[in-house]
């Protein structure tokens, strides 16, 4: 899953400070954080210093309920004090600091461990874990987001570190003993973690050092070396697919999650994927688990570099899921038999769902309720991408595929500015470069926006497979495995 932090309109502004001095160090940033790790109290004490730009107020946001639907995440923000008058609006996750003049504002607060007892669902993996031998925290649950429109920077300095090395995805080469200066967005959309028995491995891919943070659970098949091999192969394949050589470090974090009943889940962040797995796992790199990993690493492109607005999760999740099948099949992480089995389960889930025909605009409000509302964008978008792959291949006599469309869409996204959502109109216009223009608009609106299911036996397919209908449900059969797999090479 992947949700970019929603930009909020500016209620106030913070100015860029030329320098701020603390403990004989000079930090050239808008916001300056000093962190103290206090494991015996299961908390991190945070000191923030900044200079305001005008004589009214600074509005800061803590947490983001869009991550896991955690409307109670503000319970972990405690003991806030400020050098200026301050109001804490818990209901709206806001901290409002009132000030006059441009004197430096100092704000301190604690982030506490709010893990719950008993079985944990996937959404609980977003909570901070602050313990003697383990630390895990999303940047959005440690730092504050100023409500401003311009890009801002922040410095991070640890005054008191835990007794184990740290891995921060916004500066993965730094173990916490150096000051980091990054943008606020990079810091918020990040993971900071580490612990005893937590391995941190540097992995060169191309000209860039990437990083793996992995905590084995003790089973002989759950090893750092095996995960490292997967990461090297999968990430290199993605860079090749997107014709996008790795120029910035990417971080993969995988750790067991206490008291969970699911095999693996996670979330994509800026230049990072953070995953949690069941601590009782005996074989980590199963076909389904590698699907989860590849899907979420894939959000480095679909969801970060190429996005539609948040209403169109059929693209962000569904198209990304189809390309996950593509990449894992091409690299042997998914067998043709596994492809058949999972796609037929997908068909059964989607075409048999009571909410199958739900219009696109009605899905997002129910996404975190669970059940079919969560999975409908995945199912619908995956099936649509599969159909477009066949249509483009058929239209071009096998000379082009969905990959050519996605690479062209990537060029549009780069011209639009990284991270800025493309419009649905741009998606349709780009698709019309590969399919008849007269058909494309109705195809997208009828099936993705209005929610009408496709009749799959009426659509040209990628080579090496066929669709039949059994009890009104489509069923895929791979008729020529070599030809089928060659499509993804």
Image (tube, rainbow, N blue to C red):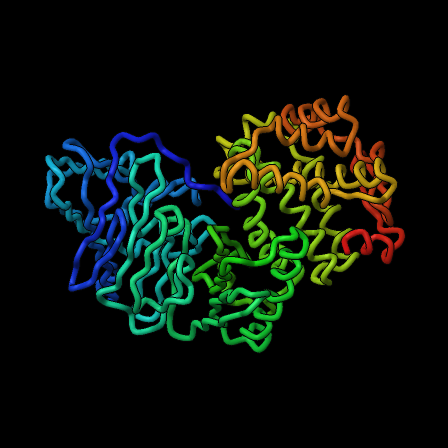
The answer to whether residue 172 is seen in the rendering is: yes
Question: Relative to residue 147, is residue 189 depicted above or below?
Answer: below
- Total marks drawn? 0
- The answer to whether residue 358 is seen in the rendering is no
Q: Position of residue 370 (x, y in %)?
A: 52, 40
112 relative position to 187: left or right: left
- Residue at x 30%, y 31% (from the top left corner): 10
Q: Position of residue 443 (x, y in %)?
A: 73, 26
Residue at 29% across, 57% down:
156
- On the image, the x and y values in percent for residue 483 come to 87, 54
Pick the front one: 30 or 9: 30
- The residue at the far bottom in this view is 220
At 67% from the left and 28% from the top, the residue drawn is: 429
User: Depth check: 142 or 183 in front?
Assistant: 183
Snapshot quadrant of residue 60: top left
Q: Nearer the viewer, residue 126 or 349?
A: 126
Name the quarter where the C terminus is drawn: bottom right
Percent across and percent down for residue 214 are 48, 68
Of the pair 308 and 223, the residue shown nearer to us: 308
């Amino acid at each position: 899953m992947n949700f970019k932090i929603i930009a909020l309109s500016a209620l106030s502004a913070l100015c860029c400070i030329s320098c701020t001095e603390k403990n004989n160090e000079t930090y050239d940033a808008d916001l300056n954080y000093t962190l103290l790790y206090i494991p015996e109290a299961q908390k991190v004490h945070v000191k923030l210093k900044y200079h305001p730009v005008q004589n009214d107020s600074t509005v800061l946001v803590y947490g983001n309920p869009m991550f896991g639907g955690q409307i109670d995440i503000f319970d972990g923000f405690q003991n806030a004090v400020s050098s200026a008058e301050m109001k804490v609006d818990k209901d709206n996750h806001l901290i409002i600091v009132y000030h006059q003049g441009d004197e430096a504002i100092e704000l301190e607060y604690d982030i506490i461990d709010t893990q719950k007892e008993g079985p944990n669902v996937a959404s609980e993996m977003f909570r901070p874990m602050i313990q003697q031998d383990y630390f895990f925290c999303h940047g959005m649950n440690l730092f504050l987001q100023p409500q401003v429109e311009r890009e801002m920077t922040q410095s991070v300095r640890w005054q008191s570190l835990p007794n184990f090395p740290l891995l921060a995805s916004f500066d993965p080469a730094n173990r916490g003993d150096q000051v980091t200066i990054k943008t606020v967005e990079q810091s918020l959309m990040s993971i900071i973690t580490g612990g005893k028995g937590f391995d941190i491995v540097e992995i060169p891919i191309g000209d860039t050092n990437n990083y793996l943070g992995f905590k084995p659970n003790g089973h002989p098949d759950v090893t750092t070396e095996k995960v490292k091999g997967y990461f090297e192969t999968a990430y290199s394949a993605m860079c090749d697919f997107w014709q996008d050589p790795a120029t910035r470090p990417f971080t993969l974090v995988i750790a067991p999650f206490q008291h969970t009943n699911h095999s693996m889940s996670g979330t994509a962040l800026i230049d990072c994927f953070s995953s949690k797995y069941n601590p009782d796992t005996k074989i980590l790199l199963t076909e389904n688990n590698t699907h989860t990993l590849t899907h979420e690493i894939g959000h480095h492109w679909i969801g970060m570099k190429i996005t539609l607005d948040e209403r169109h999760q059929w693209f962000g999740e569904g198209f990304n899921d189809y390309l996950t099948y593509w990449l894992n099949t091409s690299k042997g992480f998914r067998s043709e038999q596994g492809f058949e089995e999972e796609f037929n389960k997908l068909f059964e889930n989607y075409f048999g769902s009571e909410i199958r025909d739900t219009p696109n605009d009605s899905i997002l409000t129910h996404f975190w309720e669970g059940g079919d509302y969560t999975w409908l964008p995945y199912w619908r978008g995956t099936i649509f991408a599969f159909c477009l792959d066949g249509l483009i291949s058929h239209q071009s006599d096998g000379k082009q595929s969905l990959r050519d469309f996605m690479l062209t869409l990537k060029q549009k996204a780069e011209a639009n500015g990284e991270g800025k959502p493309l419009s649905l109109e741009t998606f349709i216009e780009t698709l019309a470069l590969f399919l008849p223009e007269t058909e494309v608009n109705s195809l997208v609106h009828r099936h993705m926006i209005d929610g009408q299911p496709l009749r799959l036996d009426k659509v040209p397919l990628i080579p090496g497979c066929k669709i039949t209908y059994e009890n009104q449900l489509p069923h895929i059969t791979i008729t020529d495995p070599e030809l089928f797999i060659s499509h993804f090479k």
